Amino acid sequence: MSNNTPASSIVSERYALALLDLAEQGKAVDKVLDDFASLEKALEDSKDFARFIAAPLISKSQQSAVIKDISKKGKFQKMTSNFLGVLIENGRLNALPGVIASYKKKVSEKNGEVFVKVETAFKITAKQTKDLQKKIEKALGSDVSMDMQISPEIIGGMVITIGSYMIDDSVRRKLERLNATLVKGASQSDTNGQNLREVV
């Protein structure tokens, strides 16, 4: 697969597992995690950097120059820098966001934490994130590791995924339910719109 195709979750997970295995051998699991946290923040804070990572036509030499500069400024572990070089060489730099998410998830699982993905339409504050984490931990009775993702398409609210269980409290979902109810109401006019009560 060429680097102009979005990286699949399977590809991202394979790279994450390979890196985690090396990090465990080198006793650098948490250090790589810290490097990834810096990269994740850069991806969230800079749309230009996020576009650069995903761009299909940027040469490997350009990618390498930018990533080396970021690695140097961020004082990344040699293992992290080498791994990023492998992604570039294999034409898989676009897999980086997925690799980061997969790596975080695998580390959380090994630490006995519950991995939770939270999607919001807009970035929430650090305090809001911390408060949400506390509420989820209280509800689950376990420590959790949260992967915060910005998904403008949900319009508002949030979608929380815990393993195979999803809590969809997004505006998008509510609008879909409203639309379905209106369609159903139109085909069953004798209900006099009572189906609208089904909408939360």
Image (spheres, grey):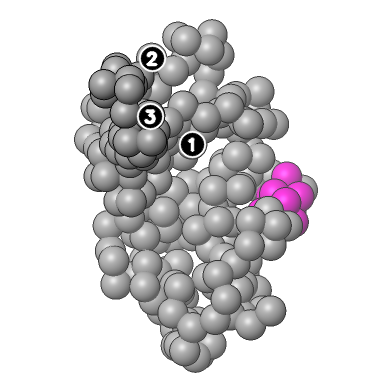
Q: Could you tell me residue 184's position as x and y percent?
A: 39, 33
Which secondary structure, mark 2?
Answer: helix
Q: Is residue 150 above or below residue 9?
A: above
One can see residue 108 in this view = yes
CB under 8 Å between callouts 1 and 3? no
Q: Distance from label 2 to label 1 (Cα)?
A: 14 Å
Point out the image quarter for the N terminus.
Answer: bottom right
Range of the magenta residues?
A: 16-24
Q: Distance from label 1 to label 3 (Cα)?
A: 38 Å
- Badge 3 or badge 2: first in the primary sequence: 2
CB under 8 Å between callouts 2 and 1? no
The quarter holding residue 164 reads: top right
Q: Which residue is mark 3?
A: 188
- Tag 2: residue type? Lys
Residue at 55%, 56% (x, y): give it: 98
Point out the image quarter for the C terminus.
Answer: top left
Q: Could you tell me residue 34's position as x and y percent?
A: 48, 47
Q: Which residue is mark 1?
A: 117
Q: Which residue is mark 2?
A: 135
CB under 8 Å between callouts 3 and 2? no
Residue at 57%, 42% (x, y): give it: 104
> Along the line of sight, which residue is nearer the eye, 188 or 194?
188
Q: Could you tell me residue 140's position as x and y percent?
A: 53, 12
Neighbours of disc 3 within 10 Å: few (<14), some (14-19), many (20+): few
Which secondary structure, mark 1?
Answer: strand
Q: Is residue 68 magenta?
A: no
Q: Is residue 141 above or below residue 189?
A: above
Magenta stretch mostly in which secondary structure? helix
> Along the line of sight, which residue is nearer the eye, 200 or 106?
200
